[in-house]
């Protein structure tokens, strides 16, 4: 049910997908749905958790498969992101999409989206492994058009 909801939320948005659509596509009853999730919002949080686990594991696995050297993994971040962004099924970041649909700070989905800070700390860890301070010009320049702006200030050894 979570995977079905995740697929539907990503494709259509959280508010556009109703419980009936989810249970029909998942092949479960409303009773089963509400046994596992008191509300659609609870399912949305579970879907965000699943996506976070999948993305984190897939992302780190891709980086580690490329190299064990921190500076090569740092550069690989941009290649991996480029692959994701150019995938025809890419519909933006699910966490940012959730923040757009759930604007209230106390919303459970917003609290779950705060996990983005942890993902940023992984990137900052790669920067530190390369001898870069995450707040340096190189770390900030990583947000330019192709992400390669980090190279001019990086002193790789």
Image (cartoon, rainbow, N blue to C red):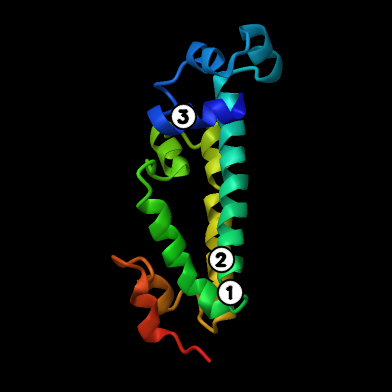
Spatial distance from mark 3 to mark 1, Cα to Cα?
34 Å
**Eyeballing the image, is 85 above or below 97?**
below
> Circle 2 sits in a helix, a strand or a loop, which is it?
helix
Q: Are marks 1 and 2 in contact (CB under 8 Å)?
A: yes
Give the residue at mark 2.
63
Drawn side of residue 81 relative to residue 63, left or right: left
Q: Are marks 3 and 1 in contact (CB under 8 Å)?
A: no
Looking at marks 2 and 3 on the same chain, the residue that comes earlier in the sequence is marked by 3
**Eyeballing the image, is 79 above or below 132?**
above
Q: Is residue 106 visible?
A: no
Give the residue at mark 1.
67
Count the marks: 3
Residue 80 lies, in percent from the top left, at 46, 61
> Circle 3 sits in a helix, a strand or a loop, which is it?
helix
Drawn side of residue 10 relative to residue 128, left or right: left
Residue 99 lies, in percent from the top left, at 43, 39
């Amino acid at each position: 049910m979570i995977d079905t909801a995740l697929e539907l939320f990503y494709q259509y948005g959280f508010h556009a997908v109703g419980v009936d659509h989810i249970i029909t596509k998942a092949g479960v009853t409303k009773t089963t749905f509400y046994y596992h999730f008191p509300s659609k919002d609870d399912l949305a949080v579970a879907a965000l958790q699943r996506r976070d686990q999948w993305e984190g594991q897939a992302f780190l696995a891709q980086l580690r498969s490329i190299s064990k050297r921190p500076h090569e993994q740092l550069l690989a971040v941009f290649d991996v992101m480029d692959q994701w962004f150019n995938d025809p099924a890419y519909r933006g970041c699910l966490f940012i999409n959730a923040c757009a649909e759930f604007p209230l700070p106390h919303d459970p989905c917003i609290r779950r989206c705060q996990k983005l800070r942890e993902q940023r700390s992984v990137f900052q860890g790669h920067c530190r492994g390369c001898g870069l301070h995450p707040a340096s010009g190189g770390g900030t320049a990583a947000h330019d058009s192709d992400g390669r702006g980090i190279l001019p200030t990086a002193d790789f050894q």
